Image (tube, coloured by chain):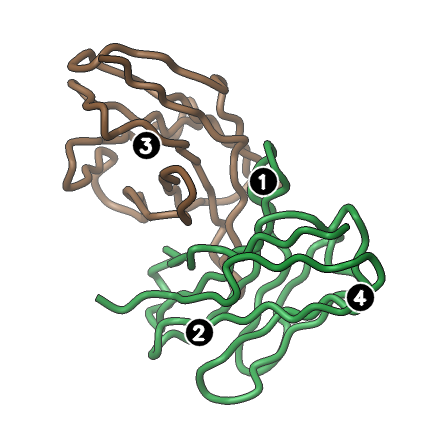
Amino acid sequence: AQSVTQLDSQVPVFEEAPVELRCNYSSSVSVYLFWYVQYPNQGLQLLLKYLSGSTLVESINGFEAEFNKSQTSFHLRKPSVHISDTAEYFCAVSEGGNTGKLIFGQGTTLQVKP
Amino acid sequence: EPEVTQTPSHQVTQMGQEVILRCVPISNHLYFYWYRQILGQKVEFLVSFYNNEISEKSEIFDDQFSVERPDGSNFTLKIRSTKLEDSAMYFCASRGQVVSSYEQYFGPGTRLTVT
């Protein structure tokens, strides 16, 4: 069965510092990987996705994630964070198929301090 | 930009009562989902729906739960007899027609409080 582990429940970081949010997954088949962001009192927004092709994917607001098949990881990075990046970040995996259901990690709270 | 909408944003109900949570998925999407997030915990898959039938359900989705697409736009989750442990944020999601594109678009959620 597939599972997702986000190794850090909380990541405090100062503004303009780099950050990495870690995500590891377990699956016996090929997977599709996603990062979702949840701002306070809001729903889940798709941040970026890996479906196939280049292992490095980028979002429009400066985040990037790299799919590493050998390490079964999909870590999220940003070279310089802003206060507005403060949110909960969820890594999710789908095995595709007929349902394409998402399995989520526990989430990581990114706290950006001034 | 099209989006998934959910109503109500917050529902308070007494234990044992029936509740219906409503969702309007993105109009040309064909795959529909319900997830829940208990406070402080991760988002959990409940059920997926395609071609007017359930395609997969989790262990959480027992006989107290049901889903329906009563018309061409709404997608509902019904809990027949609510329990205290059903208190959670419930998210609806939908996915487009392209089989190779598995990203799901989520609504803002309905916070269900069972007292």
Which one is in front, B35 or B9? B9
Chain to which mark 2 belongs: B
The green one among the chains is B
Which one is in front, A86 or A104? A86
Cα separation, mark 4 vs mark 2, equals: 23 Å
- Pick whichever of labels 4 and 2 is earlier in the sequence: 4
Q: Position of residue B77 (x, y in %)?
A: 63, 69
Please report the residue visible at 21 percent of the width from the left and 66 percent of the height from the top: B1
Which one is in front, A25 or A28? A25
- Pick whichever of labels 1 and 3 is earlier in the sequence: 1
Residue B94 occupies which quadrant of the picture? bottom left
Amino acid type, callout 2:
Val
Q: Which residue is mark 4?
A: B17
Q: Position of residue B106 (x, y in %)?
A: 41, 57
Please report the residue visible at 26 percent of the width from the left and 29 percent of the height from the top: A85
Residue contact at pointers 4 and 3, CB within 8 angstroms: no
Q: Which residue is mark 3?
A: A67
Residue B82 occupies which quadrant of the picture? bottom right
Q: Which residue is mark 2?
A: B24
Q: Is residue B41 visible?
A: yes
> Are labels 1 and 4 on one chain?
no
Q: Residues within 10 Å of mark 4 (few under 14, many from 20)?
A: few
Outermost residue to the bottom: B71
The tally of labels here is 4
